[in-house]
Amino acid sequence: MEVATELATLTPLTIASAAADLRAGRLTSVALTRTMFDRIDAAEGLGAFVCLTRDAAMQAADAADADFTAGIDRGALQGIPLAVKDIISTADAPTTANSRILAPDWGGGVDAPVVARLRAAGAVIVGKSTTSEFACGLPDPDTGFPVPRNPWNPQHSAGGSSSGTGVAVAAGLVLGGLGTDTGGSVRFPAALNGHTGLKVTFGRVPKNGVVPLGFTLDSIGPMARSAEDSALMLEVMAGADLDDPSCAAAPVPMYSTLLDGGLEGVRIGVPMPYFFDSPGLDDEVRTAVLLAIDVLGAGGAEVSTTVVEHARLAKEANAITMGAEAFAYHRNDLVNRWTTYGRHTRMTLGRGAMFTAADYTQAQRFRAAFRRHLAELFTRFDVLATPTWPIPAPRIDDMASEDNVIGPSFCGQWNLSGLPAVAVPCGFSSSGLPVSMQIVGRPFAEATVLGVAHAYQQATDWHERVPPALI
Amino acid sequence: MDDTSTESSGHTAAVEHLLTSAGLTVADSEFERFVRVYPLLRAQADGMYAAEFAAEDLSLGYDPAFGFN
């Protein structure tokens, strides 16, 4: 317990540093995991978790320590406490999607492949983290599930839909976790809570065992404090799975070994129209992201402005695609159990009925043209840099489900095109809320986007900031 | 009836038709919210019909060297 008590005063703590401490004998997984549960209990009001798997986690931590003692090393995740978003199936806890709709036995009590890979690498799964219902909509206390709150100011939103993992990582309740991203659901909470979040290339990580939202858009991504930690998670998570036809057989690099901190010669495009001049973009966010890009330039990157054609249409095509695909999945339950869905969720899903088959088809035709445009753009740039989210976290009681229809989004474009994109903390608003930059890359160029993010994080410490009152 | 009210009643009729076709039964307040947001959604969908995307073909393409597996 002494180690655990001491740990509680040490922040921040990354996967990389914990992995080093575990191997040096300065820390045990049991002590680390116990500390995480102490923090989770103390921060219950943040609504980060739907379900905790204490016994299984402590057993896994004990097994990790036993392996260390026996000289067995499964890699950097051995003994590391992680959270799993509650739309991803796990063997030791129900999957609810934070909904009263989903069948209680959904997932069949089996780990999704991505969870199985984490466990095989020795990770300690502490529980299922809060999600927006079915990964869409807004928190709704009437559904009986926790309302996630921003650890920097609990009156403000934690973002969504991977809210709980975002809160838990930012508040130091876990060292990393899984989120899913269909229109920004990894990057949005990463941006609002102030940590790193990677939306992977479509097909980079198997997505079977996940409750679908948009079949052609969904991906599972790592959420962690740093780009390095995200790389350590991704190299375990990525790779083909025979039961997921959408998952690519592309080789999986050891991403963490490719992070050299260098930016020399990296060509960064800064798409000014839409991403930096939309009326809904907060001035403080714009300024912080442009300053962050200056840091990249000072580090040796070649920075120039560019244009992403039809960026607004791409956001809207993503919304149409997601709306139609989600409606297809939920249609029978929406017809028969409309009021069993949360009030925000049913309005969001119901919007899928507002589009016609021709609208969906046109969105896919646009998608083909947009992807071709990006393929040409990425012959001139290695990455693009944009704000992740246009505003700092709004107050929870100011949010409406129509907000994402009206306002700009800088995330959905990359789901539509399937590209990898990482959210990187780059400052705080005058109200003390995190602000985030987004780095976008070519298909399967996760090493490049994480490399740029890592280089930025070698020059800055925004990602290491932890809400002071919590730990 | 002026143009605005004609347009509004058109949106109301469209939403009623779309919800009925989808089999959805919603509360009056929810129906009104759908009617309010519908013009935005319709405008966004209409944007997908721009002439410059008219040549896009979504046909599947198979490499004859490979089968399904």
Image: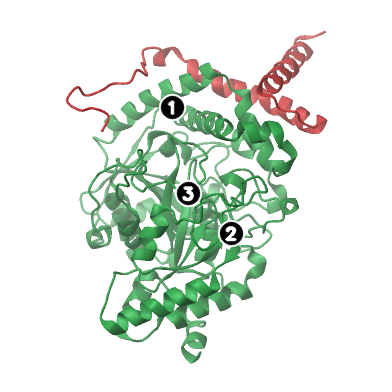
Determine the image quadrant of residue A367. Answer: top left
The subunit carrying tag 3 is A
Q: Which residue is labeled 2 in the image?
A: A430
Q: Which mark is residue A310?
A: 1
Neighbour class for label 2 at 10 Å: few (<14), some, many (≥20)? few
* Quarter of the view holding residue A66: bottom left
Looking at the rendered structure, the kind of residue marked 1 is His
Query: Quick one: label 3, few (<14), some, or many (20+) residues within 10 Å?
Result: many
Q: Residues within 10 Å of mark 1 (few under 14, many from 20)?
A: some
> In the displayed structure, would residue A113 be above or below residue A65?
above
* Secondary element type, mark 3: strand
Q: Is residue A43 left or right of residue A419?
A: right
Colour chosen for chain B: red
Residue A21 visible (yes or no): no
Q: Mark 3 vs mark 2: same chain?
A: yes
Q: Which residue is painted at 23% across and 54% down in the image?
A: A253
Residue at 29% over, 44% down:
A444
Q: Given contact means CB atoms under 8 Å apart, are the residues at marks 1 and 2 in contact? A: no
The chain that appears green in the image is A
Q: How far apart, in angstroms, are the residues tagged by discs 3 and 2?
A: 30 Å
Q: Are marks 1 and 2 on the same chain?
A: yes
Badge 2 amino acid: Ser
Rendering coords of residue A187 (x, y %) = 47, 50
**Residue A468 place in picture, x, y as percent:** 57, 74
User: Which colour scheme appears in the figure?
Assistant: by chain
- Mark drawn on residue A180: 3
Q: Name which of mark 1 and mark 3 comes first in the sequence.
A: 3
The answer to whether one can see residue A166 in this image is yes
Establish if A276 lies above or below A114.
Answer: above
Q: What count of labels does the image hold?
A: 3
